Image: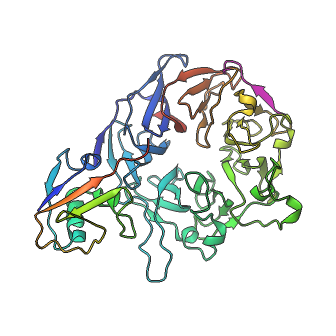
Amino acid sequence: MRVLIPHALRSYTGQRDQVSAQGETLDDLLWDLDRKFPGMRFRMIDEQDQIRRHVVIFVKGAKTTNLAEPLADSEEVVIVQALSGG
Amino acid sequence: MSEPGVQLESGATLVVATRKGIFFLQPHGDRTDWRLSEPVFLGHIVNHAVVDPRDGTTMLAGARTGHLGPTVFRSRDGGATWIEADRPPAFDKAGPGEKSRVVSHTFWLSPGHVDEPGVWFAGTSPQALWISRDAGATWEGVRGFNDHPDYEIRTEDPQAGTPDGPVLHSILIDPRDARHMYLGLSGGGVYETRDQGESWNPLNQGMATTLADPSGDGVVQPTSIDWKEIGPEHDPHCVQMHPLAPDVLYQQNHCGIYRVQRPAERWQRIGDNMPSDIGDIGFVMGLHPRDPDTCWVFPMDGTDVWPRTSPDGKPAVYSTRDAGSSWQRQSVGLPGRGWYTVKRQCLSVDDADPVGVYFGTTSGEVWGSFDEGASWSCLAQHLPEIYSVEVAELA
């Protein structure tokens, strides 16, 4: 399925703003992304499997913090990067 | 992830890590003309960037951004190209009932012993020690420290309020014995291992603590508390081991300047010999590469609410040539007034003769002295807030 990539993570995807990845759950999909773009998952998900504070992920148009979220009926996952700091 | 870097010349280099990326300064001809590189990892918060003195080409950098998790970047070609660590420092996933820990950032990087090429150590916030045996590609926790039964009382709670989080820093490896190491915890004190991290003992005797804050106002008085050798009230800011006399340790502590000559266990406060109107509070300390009695500090204002700028806004380095018995002010060339801080990784020395001394400021200036501190010149300005300055010799 299609995954939309925010600017801050495009150094992993060769500057592509959309990539393809697969998974029955959001967690599966994020691991598939990490196989294709090594290191990418840890920048978004910490070692306790929590989505990092400034990363927001939308599945079927709704924000989710549940990595077990099923993706069976999804066509698109949107990763959004909050911009904070200064 | 790979990133383009910069093409650098071989020879002397200052590696300047900042809140907005890494910059390199290299002298052109003699040391009076310095050229500043383009930034690498522009926008990344880089706490420490270090060249491996064992090969002169490997560089590691501890980095994060305001929104992405922490990682370690590596260059194996003198900074021309960079790749990300395959497995940066990360705690194990907590089991049921276990306290979960999450690496906030890699604060400190130390190349390992000369007889162990490829070995590096890292210190993070929350306070933990990490080892890599493959030049920074993969990292594993040093369980003798990170999982010690007394971890919680030895280290500082990440929620305790230290700005930017408690850090593990000053990872020092005895050049005579790779298994003999020291580290600093801010807060938490100094610890020593003789088995490369399997077991650690505190080395904090003689230290004033933050509970007996030397600024005096509004803090617990030293007579009203029990002094303990273990605990986050110990706050070494920067610990240094002399490379030719590894039994000589210096420490710029939250509470003063100290020295110990092992096997003695008790630190001696040599900062009491500083001028009383300057005091001996600061972040940084640098040692002369050949003379164990000579070091440099950059005192800061620790009164009131701790501005951490130079006392009275008059920047000055102080040096001793007699192991702290006396101190000399070294401010020729520095601005008459200035309101910056020099953070704990931001003073470094080279091994030239005379020794070059360098420091970077929170206001983005790099200053250098080529006469062992007698006079100073500004080598770069208008950089982002500087987090570390390291001297390197590129192959």
* Residue B328 part of the magenta segment: yes
Q: Residue at x 10, y 64 (%)?
A: A75
- For the C terminus of chain B, the quadrant is top left
Q: Residue B86: in sight, yes or no?
A: no
Outermost residue toward the bottom in this view: B96
Q: Which residues are magenta?
A: B326-335
Tell whether B19 sits left or right of B82: right
Q: Residue at x 46, y 52 (%)?
A: B117
- Front-most of A39 and A83? A83
* Residue at the limit of the structure toward the right, as seen here: B223
Given residues B236 and B266, the one toward you in this image is: B236
Q: Position of residue B13 (x, y in %)?
A: 49, 30
Residue situated in front as seen by the camera: B18 or B157: B157
The location of residue B211, given as percent across then percent down, is: 77, 59
Q: Is residue B348 visible?
A: yes
Quadrant of the rendered image containing residue B262: bottom right
- Residue B134: within the magenta? no
Instruction: Give how far across and how far down residue B342 sits, in percent.
Output: 62, 36
Q: Quadrant of residue B375?
A: top right
Q: Residue furthest front?
A: A62
Q: Is residue A78 above or below residue B341?
A: below
Quadrant in the rendering for residue B184: bottom right
Q: Please tell me which residue is depicted at 69% across the width and 49% down the height of the picture.
A: B246
Instruction: Give the mark count.
Output: 0
Which secondary structure class fits the magenta region best?
loop
Where residue B313 appears, x then y in whole percent?
Answer: 71, 29
